[in-house]
Amino acid sequence: QLQLQESGPGLVKPSETLSLTCTVSGGSITTTNYYWSWIRQPPGKGLEWIAYIFYTGTTNYNPSLKSRVTISVDTSKNQFSLTLSSVTAADTAVYYCAGQPSWFDPWGQGTLVTVSS
Amino acid sequence: EIVMTQSPATLSVSPGERATLSCRASQSVSSNLAWYQQKPGQAPRLLIYGASTRATGIPARFSGSGSGTEFTLTISSLQSEDFAVYYCQQYNNWPYTFGQGTRLEIK
């Protein structure tokens, strides 16, 4: 059974870069059955898909964030990562990683990232 | 971008009663529609995909219907653990988008 776990700093300063990693366990990230996505949820608000990556390195980004986002994969570590540059308070959110056959499942537990000086 | 609109924003229902949640897409998404349940402090949980197929382990009291632009999630007899926020999500067109959620509360 696939399980995902996010990791990374919980506090980032404005204008700096947010970096998160998702570790996949219970299966290989090189499966052809899944894309791997990042999704975020500002406190008290709804869900926003950020980006996905396939193990081959194929990527897709939400146009609303594309200029600031990079997603990457490390198959040797069974991990994929997110960087978001030039963060502001509006980027404060719980960040989830998820497996994506088409819909999103499974999900990691999420990690709260706060942007504040 | 496809806009997903859920109604109502909040639904108050008594335990044991039926709940009907709606989701409308700004353009057709065929049957490429999923429903999720989210409880406070938890990640969303997949309930339904393909508009009407229950995910593994989801009780039969949850059912989904619809296609094109109009979708419904029905919970036939509400249990205490069903009170949560529900989101619909289309995966027909990129970027994949979510509705704003319906909060199901105890009446």
Image (cartoon, coloured by chain):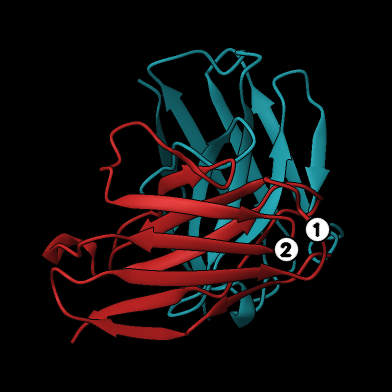
Task: Report the quarter where the N terminus of chain A lies.
Answer: top left
Chain B color in figure: red
Name the residue type under label 1: Ser
Front-most of residues A74 and B15: B15
On the image, the x and y values in percent for residue A113 come to 47, 65
Tell whether A95 sits left or right of B57.
right
On the image, the x and y values in percent for residue B70 come to 66, 65
Name the residue type under label 2: Thr
Would you say the residues marked 2 and 1 are in contact, meaning their CB atoms lie under 8 Å apart?
yes
Read off the residue under disc 1: B28
At horizontal 61% and vertical 72% (from top left) the residue drawn is A91
At horizontal 66% and vertical 70% (from top left) the residue drawn is B24
| SS state under label 1 | loop
On the image, the x and y values in percent for residue B100 come to 56, 75
What count of labels does the image hold? 2
Instruction: Give the Cα separation between the discs numbered 2 and 1.
Output: 5 Å
On the image, the x and y values in percent for residue A65 come to 79, 63
Mark closer to the chain start, 2 or 1:
1
At horizontal 57% and vertical 47% (from top left) the residue drawn is B51
Answer yes or no: is residue A12 visible.
no
In the drawing, what numbered circle is on residue B88? none
Tell whether B7 sits left or right of B5.
left
Tell whether B49 sits left or right of B3.
left
Tell me: residue B56, above or below residue A85: above
Chain A color in figure: cyan
Read off the residue under disc 2: B69
